[in-house]
């Protein structure tokens, strides 16, 4: 897996063809995980290490808590694959 950062530009940012080639998954902090280097080049994404990407995700959800459900009141945690 490769880790990238780039801002979602809206319609056409990830196309059906992009996901057909290799799934593109978005995470908090404008972090994207994919093996689709063609997509990354097209959207001018910057490659990051997993540690760098995880730090961006952590920073973007810092102070976020679950509001409902069994985890209500617990800190939100997102771990990259």
Image (tube, rainbow, N blue to C red):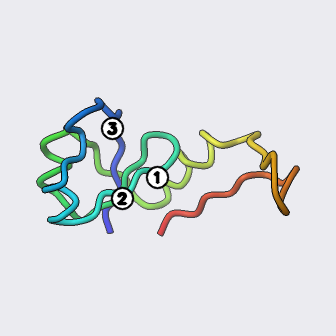
Q: Position of residue 28 (x, y in %)?
A: 52, 45
- The residue wearing badge 1 is 53
Q: Secondary structure at mark 1?
A: helix
- The residue wearing badge 3 is 6
Number of marks in the rendered image: 3
**In this picture, residue 16 sits left or right of residue 60:** left
Q: Earlier in the sequence, mark 1 or mark 2?
A: 2
Residue 33 numbered mark, or none? 2
1 or 2: mark nearer the eye: 2
What distance separates the C-alpha of mark 3 from that of mark 2?
Answer: 11 Å
* Structural crowding at the residue carrying mark 1, measured as other residues with C-alpha within 10 Å and reported as few (<14), some (14–19) or many (≥20): many
* Structural crowding at the residue carrying mark 2, measured as other residues with C-alpha within 10 Å and reported as few (<14), some (14–19) or many (≥20): many
The answer to whether the residues at label 1 and label 3 have Cβ atoms under 8 Å apart is: no
Q: Nearer the viewer, residue 81 or 14?
A: 14
Residue 43's image quarter?
A: top left
**In the rendered image of this protein, does residue 38 appear above or below residue 30?**
below
The answer to whether the residues at label 1 and label 2 have Cβ atoms under 8 Å apart is: yes
Residue at the farthest top position: 9
What distance separates the C-alpha of mark 1 from that of mark 2?
Answer: 9 Å
**In this picture, residue 17 sits left or right of residue 74:** left
């Amino acid at each position: 897996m490769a880790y990238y950062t780039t801002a979602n530009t809206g319609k056409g940012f990830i196309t059906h063809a992009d996901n057909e080639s290799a799934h593109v998954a978005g995470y908090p902090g404008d972090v994207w995980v994919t093996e689709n280097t063609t997509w990354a080049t097209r959207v001018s994404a910057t490659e990051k290490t997993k540690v760098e990407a995880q730090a961006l995700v952590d920073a973007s959800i810092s102070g976020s808590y679950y509001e409902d459900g069994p985890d209500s009141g617990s800190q939100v945690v997102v771990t990259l694959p």
